[in-house]
């Protein structure tokens, strides 16, 4: 099991980091519409496979499903919507650099809740990794008032993502894989559909269903399955290291393909990212849930 978690984590990070290498899609649909249809299709399939268990939960009026639905929207749907809203003011690269702060937020939440022993030791590696991401990925603080508002919204989003990363682990422990997939996907599909119906400007195109049969959908399905499984199997702090490992892999891929001239800043950023992610993933002291050790 421990070895399988290691392999799954590496595969997830590699897939997330390599998505920019996929061929561009020709389907004219907003990301909100595409993801809504994708989550709806996957959630419906998972519901069919687990409807008996979920129906029993609903008959018992368990609140666990609603809590899981709310937290999963904070983790997946809300960042997507807010990311689309700030796209004109903050670039994708800047957002990726800022979200490298999520591991620090997860450590802070875990420390306040006192649910993971010895978690305080991850504060320094999380900040080091964030510093490395800022060195490697171009980031500039917006000068306009609108840009600063978007920056504030993005900060709120990453705080909510950090909270959701820490909270969803214990919620998922009470669910089977198909049950969890059904609740997570259907709740996010409903949230994204509501955003579309609200008439948000970035959700005008509603041709997302046509994107379901594509290499992008298959790619996203594998990512989603790996993520939901790891959210159940891996401690929140260690899984949050993906926000450091993914930009690290992306930069290494870019260096291998584009071959830019090496700089001191690039070297320092790589060292900090490797140090931060490595300490979070491989540190064992005082942590009974060192799930990434290979025996």
Image (cartoon, grey):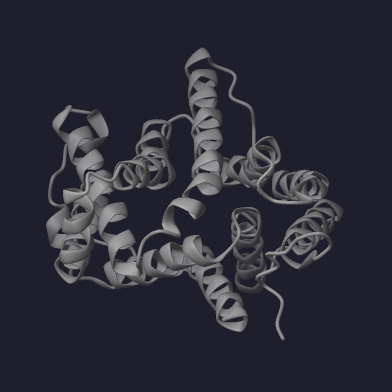
Q: Residue furthest front?
A: 60
Q: Position of residue 19 (x, y in %)?
A: 45, 65
Q: Position of residue 174 (x, y in %)?
A: 40, 59
Quadrant where the C terminus sits is: bottom right
Q: Position of residue 287 (x, y in %)?
A: 76, 60
Residue found at x 61% / y 59%: 235
Observer-nearest of 177 and 249: 177
Observer-nearest of 166 and 268: 166
Residue 282 visible, this orientation: yes
Observer-nearest of 242 and 83: 242
Q: Position of residue 28 (x, y in %)?
A: 19, 52
Please state if 1 lies on the left or on the right of 256 as rendered.
Answer: left
Residue found at x 61% / y 83%: 3
Residue 212 visible, this orientation: no
Quadrant where the N terminus sits is: bottom right
Q: Residue furthest bottom?
A: 295
83 above or below 20? above
Observer-nearest of 217 and 221: 221
270 above or below 252? above
Residue found at x 30% / y 48%: 65
Please state if 240 lies on the left or on the right of 40 as rendered.
Answer: right
Please state if 215 lies on the left or on the right of 94 as rendered.
Answer: left
Residue found at x 82% / y 49%: 121
Q: In which image quadrant can residue 266 be found? A: bottom right
Q: Residue furthest top?
A: 145
147 above or below 232? above
Label tally? 0
């Amino acid at each position: 099991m421990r070895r399988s978690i290691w392999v799954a984590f590496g595969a997830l990070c590699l897939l997330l980091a390599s998505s920019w290498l996929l061929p561009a899609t020709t389907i004219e649909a907003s990301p909100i519409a595409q993801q809504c249809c994708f989550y709806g299709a996957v959630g419906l399939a998972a519901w069919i496979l687990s409807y008996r268990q979920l129906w029993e939960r609903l008959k018992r009026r368990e609140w666990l499903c609603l809590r899981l639905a709310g937290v999963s929207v904070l983790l997946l749907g809300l960042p997507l919507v807010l990311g689309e809203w700030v796209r004109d003011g903050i670039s994708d690269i800047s957002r990726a650099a800022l979200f490298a702060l999520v591991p620090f937020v997860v450590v802070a939440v875990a420390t306040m809740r006192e649910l993971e022993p010895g978690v305080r030791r991850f504060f320094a590696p999380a900040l080091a990794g964030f510093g490395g991401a800022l060195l490697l990925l171009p980031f500039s603080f917006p000068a306009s008032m609108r840009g600063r508002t978007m920056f504030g919204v993005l900060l709120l989003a990453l705080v909510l993502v950090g909270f959701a990363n820490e909270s969803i682990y214990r919620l998922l422990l009470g669910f089977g894989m198909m049950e969890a997939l059904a609740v997570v996907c259907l709740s996010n599909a409903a949230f994204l559909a509501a955003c579309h119906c609200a008439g948000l400007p970035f959700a005008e195109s509603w041709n997302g269903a046509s994107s379901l049969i594509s290499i992008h959908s298959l790619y996203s399905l594998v990512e989603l399955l790996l993520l939901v499984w790891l959210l159940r199997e891996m401690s929140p702090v260690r899984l949050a290291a993906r926000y450091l490992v993914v930009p690290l892999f992306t930069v290494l891929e870019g260096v291998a393909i584009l071959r830019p001239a090496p700089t001191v800043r690039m070297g320092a950023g790589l060292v900090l990212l490797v140090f931060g992610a490595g300490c979070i993933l491989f540190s064992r002291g005082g942590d009974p849930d060192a799930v990434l050790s290979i025996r």
